[in-house]
Image: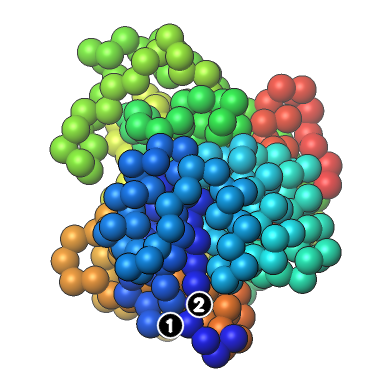
């Protein structure tokens, strides 16, 4: 495609306004021509702020998909609806960028893969942590061989108190789960990406439903990035508040995954409240628990820790302060749609992430490992 890419957006909530709309706004060769949301006012507001002069507004995504001039859509809805809408979009001839996670279940994710193969449309998933500068540096360190054979990793995103109290995050029927599927998915995707290892042997895990239902409002909140205190309704909270998983890869490598919205610990585990990865290999190790890569290796026969690169604060359009660099996720996506590059997050990779997440939930229920 050499023509301007015409994009439609299904879902005009927080992640749409926080990442997708401002991200696409800065990309040449793309137009935002259609906006759909169950709350019409949100779609109208998005169309006015970001859309072309003739941008259309919908409350039913099926009507949006009938427009033959739309090349691709962003699916920005609650997790449980990702499969239905993404498959319908591909069957309607649209390429799809679906927000993370790929789906709320392995079966849904597999159906999305099958629909992609059947229709020949592009499908990618919104795992933006791969594009953070510190993680790009970490990937280069790994690919350049500084770690050798990676045999152990930790994928971490732990909030001491950080339950999202907007949207439907604590509603299992719409999200499929809590922090594991919401933020743990970022840490897991990042770690698998850095290791370049998606060949899973088995998974063991436990999810905990403790503090989400136990803590009353006066003992819940912490001040979040919006200057508000996050207090949740423990009467309607029906997802886990933390989850841990042990992932054994077929080459013997192991990954420990930890995710929480609420857990009793002394401090946050993660750099500036974000997903982090720690990798250990035969030549060295690294972690991304700050805005630079810390490389543990041997120099002149001495164990040493080297800081790799300069600190660069992570940037997400709409969420970050200061000058707005180009959104790499949006840029790569539009270039792929124009035939000028490859997708950065493949659907196969995202499918493996979803399989692992479901396996942790299943293992927690059954008390048994889940073999792939």
Q: Quadrant of residue 26?
A: bottom left
Give above or below for 12 relative to 369: below
Where residue 129 appears, x then y in whole percent? 45, 61
Residue occupying image coordinates x 38% and y 82%: 28
Q: Determine the CA span between mark 1 and mark 2.
A: 6 Å
The disc label shown at residue 29, or none: 1
* Residue 70 seen in this snapshot: yes
Where residue 7 appears, x then y in whole percent? 49, 67
Residue occupying image coordinates x 52% and y 82%: 335
Using the image as rendered, state which of residue 108 and residue 46 is in the foreground.
46
Q: Quadrant of residue 122?
A: bottom right
Q: Quadrant of the N terminus?
A: bottom right
Using the image as rendered, state which of residue 311 and residue 186 is in the foreground.
186
The disc label shown at residue 5, or none: 2
Residue occupying image coordinates x 70% and y 40%: 105
Give above or below for 232 relative to 316: above
């Amino acid at each position: 495609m050499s023509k301007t890419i015409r994009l439609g957006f299904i879902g005009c909530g927080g992640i749409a306004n926080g990442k997708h709309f401002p991200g696409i706004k800065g990309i040449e060769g793309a137009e935002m021509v259609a906006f759909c949301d169950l709350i019409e006012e949100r779609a109208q507001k998005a169309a006015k702020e970001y859309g072309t002069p003739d941008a259309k507004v919908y409350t039913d995504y099926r009507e949006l998909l009938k427009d033959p001039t739309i090349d691709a859509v962003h699916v920005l809805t609650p997790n449980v609806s990702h499969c239905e809408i993404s498959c319908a979009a591909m069957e309607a001839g649209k390429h799809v960028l679906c927000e993370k996670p790929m789906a709320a279940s392995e079966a849904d994710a597999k159906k999305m893969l099958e629909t992609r193969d059947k229709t020949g449309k592009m499908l990618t998933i919104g795992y933006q942590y791969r594009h953070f500068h510190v993680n790009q540096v970490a990937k280069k360190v790994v690919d350049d061989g500084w770690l050798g054979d990676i045999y152990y990793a930790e994928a971490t995103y732990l909030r001491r108190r950080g339950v999202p109290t907007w949207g439907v995050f604590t509603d299992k029927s719409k999200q499929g789960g809590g922090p594991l599927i919401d933020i743990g998915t970022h840490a897991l995707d990042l770690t698998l990406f850095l290791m370049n290892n998606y060949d899973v042997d088995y998974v063991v895990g436990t999810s905990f439903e403790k503090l989400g239902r136990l803590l009353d409002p006066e003992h819940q909140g912490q001040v979040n990035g919006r200057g508000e205190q996050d207090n949740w309704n423990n009467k309607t909270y029906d997802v886990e508040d933390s989850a841990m998983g042990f992932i054994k890869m077929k080459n013997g490598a192991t990954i420990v995954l930890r995710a929480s919205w609420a857990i009793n610990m002394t401090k946050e585990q993660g750099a500036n409240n974000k997903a982090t990865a720690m990798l250990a290999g035969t030549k060295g190790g690294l972690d991304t628990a700050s805005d630079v890569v810390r490389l543990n290796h041997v120099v002149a026969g001495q164990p040493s820790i080297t800081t790799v690169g300069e600190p660069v604060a992570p940037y997400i359009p709409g969420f970050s302060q200061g000058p707005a660099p180009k959104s790499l996720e949006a840029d790569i996506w539009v270039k792929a749609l124009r035939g000028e590059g490859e997708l950065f997050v493949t659907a196969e990779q995202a499918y493996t992430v979803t399989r692992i997440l479901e396996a942790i939930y299943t293992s927690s229920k059954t008390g048994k490992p889940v073999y792939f």
